[in-house]
Image: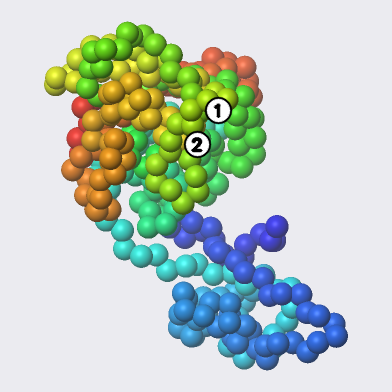
Amino acid sequence: MPPRSPLPARHGLDAAWVRTPDRDPLSPAPWVSMGAWLRHRFPERVDVDSMLAGGRFVDGSGRPVQDGDPYAPHQFVWFHRDLREEPPVPGELHVVHRDERLVVVDKPPFLSTIPRGGHVRQSVVVRLREELGLPELSPLHRLDRVTSGLLMLATERRWRGPYQTAFERRAVGKVYRALAPVAGDVELPTVVRNHIRKDRGTWRAHVVPGAPVNAETLVELEGEVDGHGLYRLTPRTGRTHQLRLHLHGLGAPIVDDPLYPVVRDVPVDDFTRPLQLLAAGLWFTDPVDGKERSFAGVRRLPLTAER
């Protein structure tokens, strides 16, 4: 682990760091200067020359690293990355609850939970760290970028452990709602149980027939909205794309799902057809003070791009 960063967070993001390699005592240093090593470390992805000129690389004391500084082994260098422009995600990020330990929000569709790939500033974590002044804010579970609804976050690192353990032990109850075709040949309520697998680098997950069960969902039909069934989904496990696959397997793929039953090529700035899946409720016994907690979202189906 690196030492504490000498740079404050920017745009809700901690500074990045790199470390010079340890020197082989039997060999001379392969780089004559820190500037030469930084150009080797970032051959094309970072404009090292302009960042050195602007004093944007700093050492552990916060002193700007100079191009001609002698190379030294096992030295940490800190910096902030340049962020690319991102299309703003429509819809309000509602703060449903906030206290000393927890923040609970109802997120709009298309907003990423964590900074990743092309979604950095347009993520729940980065936006809320800035808006709420909570530099250590971090999610305790995940929602897909296209899924809307309740997301729970820890205000500080010290609170992550007990709440993450509660999620891992499946001690947090969750309920979702979805719009999908009415599956006329399926008797509801029903419990879907199977084995879901998602391979690294692939967009879609899939069911593995005959494999041990690792995904389970209670599926209930609550009524109809705009000619579609309004489903109540209670997952008892948390596999990737579990609810989307389970409804698809019942012959009722969720309305405007970009992956199931077929992959739709949707531009990153197309917010016109949100997935009609909503994380609607959370409940649990607080692992810190033992109190019963429950939270309900403010969004309702059908979802639009503005909410």
Q: Which residue is mark 2?
A: 197
On the image, the x and y values in percent for residue 286 come to 58, 21
On the image, the x and y values in percent for residue 218 come to 42, 15
Q: Residue at the front extreme?
A: 210
Residue shown at 69% from the left, 61% from the top: 2
Number of residues whose C-alpha sits closer than 10 Å to that of mark 1, classed few (under 14), some (14–19) or many (20 or more): few
Q: Residue at the left extreme?
A: 226
Q: Residue at the right extreme?
A: 26
On the image, the x and y values in percent for residue 99 come to 50, 30
Label at residue 211: 1
Residue shown at 62% from the left, 62% from the top: 5
The image quarter containing residue 232 is top left
Q: Secondary structure at mark 1?
A: loop
Of the two numbered discs 2 and 1 on the same chain, state the one appearing first in sequence: 2
Q: Looking at the picture, does residue 213 appear above or below residue 51?
A: above
Q: Nearer the viewer, residue 57 or 85?
A: 85
Three-letter amino acid code of the residue under disc 2: Arg
Q: Looking at the picture, does residue 146 appear above or below residue 289?
A: below
> Disc 2 vs disc 1: Cβ atoms closer than 8 Å?
yes
User: Disc 2 vs disc 1: which is toward the camera?
Assistant: 1
Q: Secondary structure at mark 2?
A: strand
Count of numbered circles in the view: 2
Residue shown at 32% from the left, 27% from the top: 248
Q: Tell me the colour scheme of the image.
A: rainbow
Q: Looking at the picture, does residue 26 appear above or below residue 9?
A: below
Say left or right for 218 vs 229: right
Residue shown at 36% from the left, 65% from the top: 84
